[in-house]
Image (tube, rainbow, N blue to C red):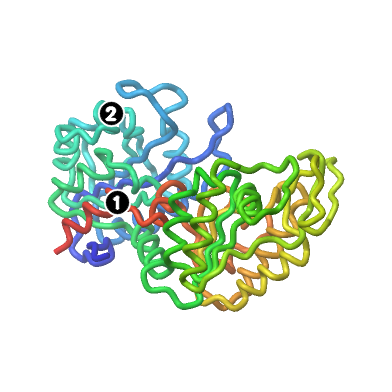
């Protein structure tokens, strides 16, 4: 997908550069930032623009504020402080910035207060977008995590800014996802875990048309086990979606592909840190058992599939990995991905938590910062923020 990239621009000296970043980081009740990965991920674009002699204004959403006001929980003030520390230079926070009128010198960075507090942001107001576009010479979208939303700072402003381009992070996301899904090395293996088939049904349907192996885990796998005629006791599943699971398996089978299902599982009678885990054959699941992980034989089989992959897309664990006794399957899968020679891309909150827990971040080909945007890209949907950059490409 052709888009103009920030790194393609060489004449930024003296230009006013507006960067839409994703600085939506978690904070504790006192407003202290508890995890700053997204802030660090935004630095390369800001630093590139500064190095070129630009005057930089950046903004982001934070939380789910009401439009028209900035509450104490909505302010980007803590982010401005952290950004200043990371850049090792002052970063002013500007409120009421849409009308302009503020001074900004080359080499300076300002943070524009929570963009979702502006009236018209979520509805992609053209009036708001035009006002914001008038503030800059160059618009940079570096917020892949919000690329699936058509809002004024992710979509509208890109229509009217003199120049619109993708930031360094956004460009990396587009390149990695395109590499994994548009022209992948074969076999292409997808791992999709999670509680419900319904939440990832469109992803599963889309991937079934593309991948060579579709590994399912968690409650999703339980629904597929039901579809294959297995008993799952009191395991989390969606019996009303058994027909959908059948369709997906049939599509894979017709293509000569496969949905490998567990031959052994780890069960317990409750989901807790104190639960007693039992490793049994999938044919031995009792009426009160809950399947909470794949068994060692199944995990080894999945690891073998991953080991021979040409490309891997990972979204979701295969068990309740938060508890040690149900983490074996996800841990073995994570290790297999880490040691694979295939290009791997991973995304989604639970997936990132598993990557952190098993300390394999440096061994994953690309870790996506997007949640919903990552999922919608996997579904094959057109992301509005990327579509408008494509339209502006020249």
* Residue name at image x 30 percent, y 53 percent: 382
Is residue 87 visible to us here? Answer: no
Residue 339 location (% of width, % of height): 64, 74
Quadrant that contains the C terminus: bottom left
Residue 323 drawn above or below residue 181: above
Q: Can I make out residue 121 in this image?
A: yes
- Residue for point 42% across, 39% down: 80
Q: Residue at x 54, y 55 (%)?
A: 246
Picture quarter with the N terminus: bottom left
- In the picture, the disc for residue 141 is 1
Please say if the residues under marks 1 and 2 sit with CB atoms less than 8 Å apart.
no
Mark 2 = which residue? 118
Instruction: Using the image as rendered, state which of residue 371 and residue 242 is in the foreground.
Output: 242
Indicate the position of residue 259 as horizontal and vertical percent values. 58, 64
**Residue 43 image-quadrant placement:** bottom left
Q: Position of residue 5 (x, y in %)?
A: 26, 63
Who is closer to the viewer here, 103 or 146?
Answer: 146
Locate residue 197 relative to residue 87 in the image: left or right: right
**Mark 2 residue crowding within 10 angstroms, few (<14) / some (14–19) / many (20+):** many
274 sits left or right of 127 in the view? right
């Amino acid at each position: 997908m052709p888009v103009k990239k920030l790194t393609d621009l060489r004449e930024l000296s003296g230009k006013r550069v507006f960067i839409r970043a994703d600085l939506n980081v978690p904070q504790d009740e006192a407003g202290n930032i508890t995890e700053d990965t997204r802030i660090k991920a935004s630095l390369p674009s800001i630093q590139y623009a500064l190095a070129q002699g630009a005057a930089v204004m950046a903004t982001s959403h934070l939380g789910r504020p009401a439009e028209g006001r900035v509450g104490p929980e909505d302010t980007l003030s803590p982010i401005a402080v952290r950004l200043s520390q990371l850049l090792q230079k002052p970063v002013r926070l500007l409120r009421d910035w849409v009308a302009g009128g503020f001074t900004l010198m080359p080499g300076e960075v300002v943070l524009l207060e929570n963009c979702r507090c502006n009236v018209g942001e979520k509805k992609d107001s053209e009036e708001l977008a035009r006002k914001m576009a008038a503030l800059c010479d160059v618009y940079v979208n570096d917020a892949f995590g919000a690329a699936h939303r058509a809002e004024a700072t992710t979509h509208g402003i890109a229509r009217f800014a003199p120049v619109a381009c993708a930031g360094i992070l956004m460009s990396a996301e587009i390149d990695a996802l395109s590499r994994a899904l548009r022209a992948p090395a074969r076999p292409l293996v997808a791992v999709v875990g999670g509680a419900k088939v319904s939440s990832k049904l469109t992803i599963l349907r889309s991937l079934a048309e593309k991948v060579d192996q579709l590994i399912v885990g968690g409650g999703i796998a339980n629904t597929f086990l039901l579809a294959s005629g297995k008993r799952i006791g009191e395991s989390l599943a969606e019996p009303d979606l058994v027909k959908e699971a059948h369709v997906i398996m049939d599509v894979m089978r017709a293509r000569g592909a496969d949905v490998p299902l567990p031959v052994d599982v780890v069960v317990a009678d409750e989901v807790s840190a104190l639960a007693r885990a039992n490793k049994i054959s999938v044919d031995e699941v009792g009426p009160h058992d809950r399947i909470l992980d794949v068994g060692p034989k199944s995990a080894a089989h999945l690891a073998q599939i991953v080991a021979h992959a040409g490309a891997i897309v990972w979204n979701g664990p295969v068990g309740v990995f938060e508890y040690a006794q149900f983490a074996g399957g996800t841990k073995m899968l994570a290790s297999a991905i880490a040691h694979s020679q295939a290009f791997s891309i991973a995304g989604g909150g639970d997936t990132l938590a598993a990557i952190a827990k098993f300390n394999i971040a440096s061994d994953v080909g690309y870790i996506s910062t997007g949640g919903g945007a990552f999922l919608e890209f996997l579904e094959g949907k057109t992301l509005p923020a990327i579509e408008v950059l494509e339209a502006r490409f020249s």
